[in-house]
Amino acid sequence: MKVIKQLQVKFIYSMILIEMIVFAAIIFSLNFAITKREADEAREFLTFLAKNNGHRPPPKQFRGKNSGKEQKTSKTPPQSDDFLMIDATSSASRENPEDFLKNFVDFFNLKHSNATDLRNYFSVRITVEGKVLELIQDFPVNYTNDEIQVFISQILNQYHENGKRCDMLTGVMYYVLDLSPFEKLVCILNLNSELKTLGKFYMYSALLYILSIVVSVLISLPISKFMIRPAQDAFIKQKQFIADASHELKTPIAVIGANIDVLESEIKGNKWLEYIKTENQRMGELVKDLLYLAKNDAGRNDLSFFDFNFSNAVENSVLPFEVVAFESQKTLELDVQKGIICNGDEKSLKQIFIILVDNAIKNSEEGAKIRVTATSDDKKIVLKVYNTGSGIPKDELEKIFLRFYRSDSSRVRKTGGYGLGLAIARTIAEDHGGTLTATSEVGHWAEFTLTIPKKK
């Protein structure tokens, strides 16, 4: 069931990643749009302020995005400083339906009509040296004369450094206009309240983003279980089929083996019986391995963990291969630290030792050197099986642990087996809370490293 859990985790990660990207794009775009709109409105207002000699522009001239268009001004001054408001019941709108519709649309386009009334703005006419000649204000300014003089000096210094007529400085936006070779007009708009509001908006956006991720995680858990249920059912049925088929094949294989033994006693030296016996034994080993993997996938492999002498277990498993190595004209070396005590399933760990040594002998040429070493420290035990030979390509170092994978297909007939040994060995290592990895230098050597904790 590890595959199903991994699939579920990947599904959850994918959903969360997609939601994070989408939410981030939406929130970032919204914040960027609002910030840009505020900056554009402030810059636009300062431009009109400068064109009107530092005073607030006439109400009909500052109309948001349509401010650049020429507006026809009425001879009768407006009754207030507010922007032009539309009277839907005026006689003009009643007489002309098109004017009424236009006015109705314009009424809803006045989104920032009163925004400038809340801003503290003023203008200063100065000399080119920065001396204040006149303070132009439409309402009281929250700065003293000395503060204004210092402020103007800072603005001029920044203006001379970057050459930007319109820029930001310590929470305000300014616009510098050349009135003559000897005078300048500096229009200043205080944006501290807007910046504080934007700061709060950014903070709330970040909190909303975090909350949305938490919610997406909570939602992804039940959805992932629902989405992977068909795959889980198919996986369970497949593993159950393999387990049942392997179990059912054990009986006929055993019967065939028994009949071969009877025939061998009656028909001695028959090569056909030898072929049948060899293939029957290989089939028995394959069924045994499949049954082990099927039980492990179903979580039915019961391992008995107890303390045992790891050093003796390695020696007892490796020494019988000395004869095999000698007959293959290969050298087998054993270097095991004495007295290593491990807490685990001794039988299954011995199976790993046998698989690794057998694999090293089968996948090396004549004259190869095979070395088995085992060491330990306070927390872990490390077993290494090294052999000289052709090695393993880098892109196959992980594939060799897949079921039925053979790195060198030309060895299939020569060495036998079905490519399940290393898959079983890694499974046993993971059941003990350890790892089994491979390293190699192509054309020179290969080495398998088993690392397990002394106690799971």
Image (tube, rainbow, N blue to C red):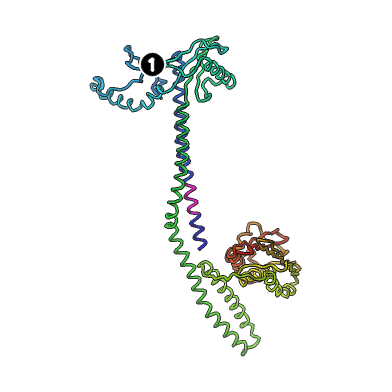
Asked whether 52 or 196 is in front, the reply is 196
SS for callout 1: loop
Is residue 83 rendered magenta in the image? no
Where residue 145 appears, as percent x and y from the top left, is 51, 14
Where residue 92 appears, as percent x and y from the top left, is 25, 20
Residue drawn at (56%, 82%), measured in percent from left and top?
Answer: 256
Where residue 298 appears, as percent x and y from the top left, is 50, 67
Q: Which residue is mark 1?
A: 58
Horizontally, residue 58 falls left or right of residue 91, namely right
As displayed, is residue 114 above or below residue 447?
Answer: above
Q: Quadrant of residue 429?
A: bottom right
Is residue 13 rendered magenta in the image? yes
Residue type marked 1? Pro
Q: Which residues are magenta?
A: 10-18
Residue drawn at (53%, 78%), measured in percent from left and top?
Answer: 250
As displayed, is residue 346 above or below residue 86?
Answer: below
Asked whether 30 or 151 is in front, the reply is 151
Give the position of the C terminus as an image quadrant: bottom right
Q: Residue furthest bottom?
A: 266
Residue drawn at (46%, 26%), measured in percent from left and top?
Answer: 40
As displayed, is residue 60 above or below residue 371?
Answer: above
Residue drawn at (54%, 72%), measured in percent from left and top?
Answer: 291
Asked whether 57 or 91 is in front, the reply is 57
Q: Magenta region, mostly helix, strand or loop?
A: helix
Where residue 221 appears, as percent x and y from the top left, is 45, 54
Asked whether 366 or 108 is in front, the reply is 108
Dot 1: few (<14), some (14–19), or many (≥20) neighbours within 10 Å? some
How many numbered marks, from 0 up?
1
